[in-house]
Image (spheres, grey):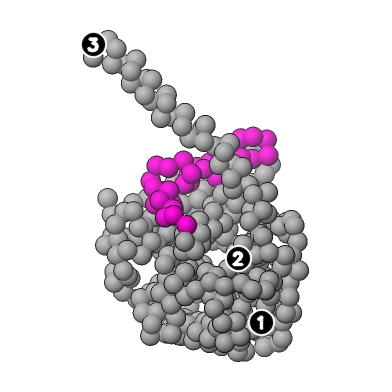
Amino acid sequence: MPQFFKPLALLILLGFSLATPAKASPELAARYSPEAWQTRRIHSGVQVFSVGEGPARAYVFMPDASGLRGLPLVLFQHGWLGMNPKNFGGLIDLVVRRGAVLIYPVYQDGDQTAPQAVTRLAAQAAANALAETEKRYPRLIDRSRTLYWGFSMGSSISLNIALQPASFGLPAPRALLLLAPGDAHHVAKGERAQSIIGPVERLPADLPVVIATGAADTSIGVPTGRALAERLCHLPSSRRNLILFPSDSDGERRITAGHGSPGAPDSRYDFPDSRRPVAEQIAGTREFEPSGSLNLLDYYGYWRLTMRLLDYVDGSEFPSELFSRKAAENRFLGYWPGGQPYREAEIEDPCS
């Protein structure tokens, strides 16, 4: 190539590479919009039952439909003092009405429960709930299609169970999603503050693991997520990723990507007392319940990660974009109402 053509060629190539995400954004905006998520809720409502009481309780959520077989399973581990599923009701409703069984262990009796006990309590409650579900509804669940989902302390629980699922009587995960991961020292002092996270270096090398946190979660999610990512370098880069979702503002509107940003409350899932009976059915609604916590980070961030991994464990193709450091789909976080794009997600690789 003549020397004077090289700068022009470089500009053309850069132009095409920079234009690609912009061209993809309108399509991505539609794919993960609230309206698109509404269409994924194909079942009219949710059936509910509980197994056990107090910290031994687990809630089982399943589609309100008959004749279902071979559904994927989501083992959903909440954060410290998150015994009430209300805070994640929006996501639970989406996951279950999409067509999945979700088990939500309580695993705590308030602050009285030591962090060192929560893995055992959560695993036992989940195993009991799974056994009861399979007894009541044979062939409803396909154990080979299991997603482990953990938030904050629940991320540590999910990791620990994934290290030895058979010893707890639980199926092994086909994928693992850890949101805003936390550890014992974030909630306790003294001996109770000792880390509960097991030897994650022993996780299977073919297990897909996505860690995601709000970039403003600088006390819990960011440092713990980075520390975990550094310990997962035995996984190939195509099976691990660390994603940071930023805060952003548009005029007077602001979204803060703090520790609680993965939450999206739904008052229909308000079960404040783990020793009382719960409603057996939750009627479906078309709209998502509005709240200050439901925003672009859910639709294009936390919900996208959850549903893409759920589709994968349920037999869809591997979501390679979730493990890409460059894919527009893994960085795009939607548009503000005025049309301005939200700040892109940041992706880190401590193993490179």
- Label 3–label 2 contact, CB within 8 A: no
In the rendered image, which quarter contains the N terminus?
A: top left
- Magenta-drawn stretch contains 341: yes
Callout 1: SS: strand
Pointer 3 residue: 2
For the magenta stretch, what is the residue range?
316-345
Q: Disc number at residue 99? A: 2
Residue where numbered disc 1 is placed:
49
Q: Nearer the viewer, residue 45 or 191?
A: 45
Q: Please state which amino acid type lies under the numbered disc 2.
A: Gly
Task: Give me the C-alpha separation between circle 3 and circle 1.
Answer: 73 Å
Q: What kind of residue is marked 1? A: Phe
Residue 51 relative to residue 182: left or right: right
- Residue 156 sits in quarter: bottom left
User: Residue shown at 38%/61% (left/top)?
Assistant: 208
First in sequence, mark 3 or 2: give its number: 3
Vertical placement of 16 versus 315: above or below?
Answer: above
The x, y position of residue 234, in whole percent, is 26, 62
Q: Residue furthest left?
A: 2
Residues at marks 2 and 1, CA–CA distance in whole angstroms: 17 Å
Nearer the observer, 248 or 278: 278
Q: Provide residue 13's location: percent of width, then percent of height.
A: 36, 24
Q: CA distance from mark 3 to mark 2?
A: 59 Å
Amino acid carrying label 3: it is: Pro
Q: Eyeballing the image, is 155 above or below 164? A: above
Residue 316 lies, in percent from the top left, at: 47, 57
Tell us which disc is closer to us: 2 or 1: 2
Instruction: Answer few, some or many: residues within 10 Å of disc 2's Cα (few below 14, many 20 plus, some between 14 and 19).
Output: many
Taking the view exactly as shown, the residue that stands out farthest to the front is: 67
